[in-house]
Image (cartoon, helix red, strand yellow):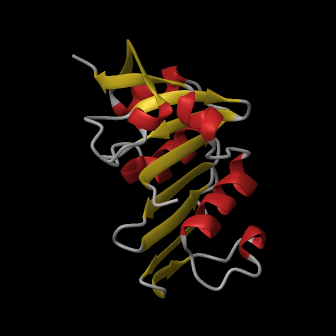
């Protein structure tokens, strides 16, 4: 596949919840393909059946996922897929402050924090397929043609 993207899923959240980070919807719509590009100028949000998915190339939301999980009383899952650099990451933060963060680079585990999740069973090292598979198992979000063709609303910092 060769994706390079950062995605954050906020369980049960809506775009209005991102105001806690100073982010507001602009009304501008991008396709998922454009929004998930690492060249995207900022985050964009897509409503999923279980919450809100943010394409977040600049990691504006991902960097504060633990804070959001506690503040919103929910689970926040982020994945980084950098196929060109062979770097993959899974981070999960929960409302009670628990977290899991793993990063694999070139087939080696370079970060391993928190207790392994049951969904990780049988995965020795993260790669593109396993990372996106974990995203799907944890959030129900499948990175496919429908999602990439779907609408993402561009977010901007509140003025």
Q: Is residue 100 left or right of residue 107?
A: right
Q: Is residue 156 left or right of residue 83?
A: left
For this orientation, the residue located farthest to the top is: 27
- Determine whether 23 is above or below 135 in the image: above
Image location of residue 122, percent across then percent down: 76, 82
Residue lying at 30% horizontally and 35% vertically, measured from the top left: 42
Can you say which quadrant of the picture contains the C terminus? Answer: top left
The residue positioned 58% from the left and 25% from the top of the image is: 14
Is residue 116 or residue 1 the one in the foreground? 1
From this view, report whether residue 90 is shown above or below residue 6. Answer: below
Percent x, y of residue 97: 58, 58
- The residue located at (43%, 41%) in the rendering is 36
In the rendered picture of this protein, how many numbered marks are placed on residues? 0
- Find residue 46 and report its image quarter: top right
Viewer-side residue, 44 vs 12 = 44
Give how far across and how far down residue 137 sits, in percent: 75, 56
Identity of the residue drawn at 49% across and 33% down: 32
As drawn, 77 above or below 16: below
Residue 129, percent across and down?
Answer: 62, 66
Q: Examine the image and state in which quarter residue 153 appears.
A: top left
Instruction: Point out the residue furthest to the bottom here.
Output: 108
């Amino acid at each position: 596949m060769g994706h390079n993207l950062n995605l954050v899923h906020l369980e049960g959240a809506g775009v209005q919840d991102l105001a806690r980070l100073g982010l507001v919807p602009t009304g501008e719509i991008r396709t998922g393909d454009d929004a998930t590009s690492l060249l995207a100028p900022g985050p964009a949000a897509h409503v999923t059946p279980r919450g809100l998915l943010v394409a977040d190339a600049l990691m504006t939301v991902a960097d504060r996922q633990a804070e959001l999980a506690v503040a919103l009383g929910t689970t926040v899952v982020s994945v980084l897929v950098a196929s060109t650099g062979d770097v993959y990451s899974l981070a999960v933060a929960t409302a009670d402050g628990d977290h899991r963060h793993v990063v694999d680079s070139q087939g080696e585990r370079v970060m391993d924090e928190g207790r392994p999740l049951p969904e990780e069973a049988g995965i020795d090292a993260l790669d593109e397929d396993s990372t996106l598979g974990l995203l799907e198992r944890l959030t129900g979000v499948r990175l496919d043609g429908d999602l990439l063709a779907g609408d993402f609303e561009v977010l901007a910092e509140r003025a």
